[in-house]
Image (cartoon, rainbow, N blue to C red):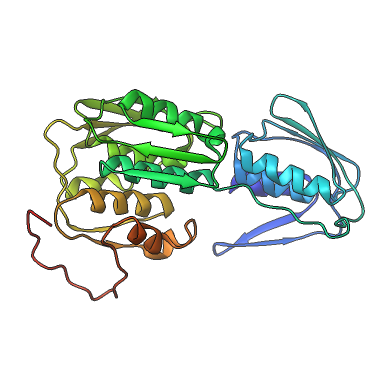
Amino acid sequence: MNEHLRALGDLGAQMDIRKGVVFANTKKLTGTTISFTVSSVGATENVLMAAVKAEGTTVLENCAEEPEVEDLINFLSSLGARISRTGTRRLEVHGVSELAPPSQHIHTIIPDRIEAGTYALAAVGTRGQITLRRCRPAHLVALLDRLGEMGVEITSERSTLHIRASGELSPVELHTQPYPGFPTDLQPQMVVVLTRARGVSIVTEGVFEQRFSYIPELNRMGGNVAVRESSAIIDGRGSRLMGAPVEGYDIRGVAALSIAALMARGESLIRGYHHLVRGYEGFVEKFTSLGGRIRLVNRNHRLRNNHPEG
């Protein structure tokens, strides 16, 4: 949040936090040079949207380069915004007084690469296969490279991706990084899948602090994952996940624990569904259509006795 508040303040907004609530107001925004200390997707997008109507020129340095940022630039440009890339991770925005869509303008948002990656990893974790249509494999190169190292069969076309994981998985080492590196938003799902690899994997989180809140819950299900500073060490040798009551504390943590539950023997109860709906549409329905046994229950639901063949 500091990146958002500082940058909007530099543009001329008065930012105030009272009892955990952000209050913002301004008479006008004025262009300036803003250098992000962290290459944040959300901050880049938020400040970019403010800068397009600020007076004068705004220079944004150390911007995020994720596909979502590029898609937003294309959309704003189609409405009359004046945005140009003037260097690596550097954007120059010349403010305009009004934005207006051209006649019969339609913009199609790019496919969600994190959603696609989550379903791909679920197929790998359950030793299954999946065909993802209307996705963009070109946005998932870092993930697909790692899956290839693990022994997963991958077939991709321009907007279709087929994943098949029938054999044993090899361990890997990876480091999350801003795009085009391995995405932090697929780190929890990958760690869950690596509990099935035949060896020790190391996953280092290089983007967000405290991104391992799901690991104690994963270990309750039988995972053998240790956290050492910013790295998760996953020992898949002899690992066998079993159903358990667990709780997820963010979008990707709940998605990861859902994959773990599908991989596990027996029934699991996962709390935190309200986080999941922020980032996935039709999550339960899509997994059910693939053969997963997953359903929504109320908070008072109690687990049945788990059976080894569950």
The picture places residue 266, in percent across and down from the top left corner, at 14, 57
The picture places residue 223, in percent across and down from the top left corner, at 19, 42
23 lies left or right of 237: right
Q: Nearer the viewer, residue 52 or 241?
A: 241
186 lies left or right of 264: right
- In this rendering, does residue 58 appear at all? yes
Name the quarter where the C terminus is drawn.
Answer: bottom left
Q: Nearer the viewer, residue 75 or 33?
A: 75
94 lies left or right of 171: right
83 lies left or right of 113: right
Q: Quadrant of residue 244?
A: bottom left
The picture places residue 92, in percent across and down from the top left corner, at 81, 34
- Identify the residue at horizontal 51%, vertical 41% (top origin): 160
Q: Is residue 100 above or below residue 187?
A: below
The picture places residue 18, in percent across and down from the top left corner, at 60, 63
- Identify the residue at horizontal 14%, vertical 37% (top origin): 239
- In this rendering, does residue 204 appear at all? no
Q: Is residue 233 above or below residue 75?
A: above
- Identify the residue at horizontal 61%, vertical 37% (top origin): 66
Q: Count the labels in the image.
A: 0
- Identify the residue at horizontal 29%, vertical 73% (top origin): 297
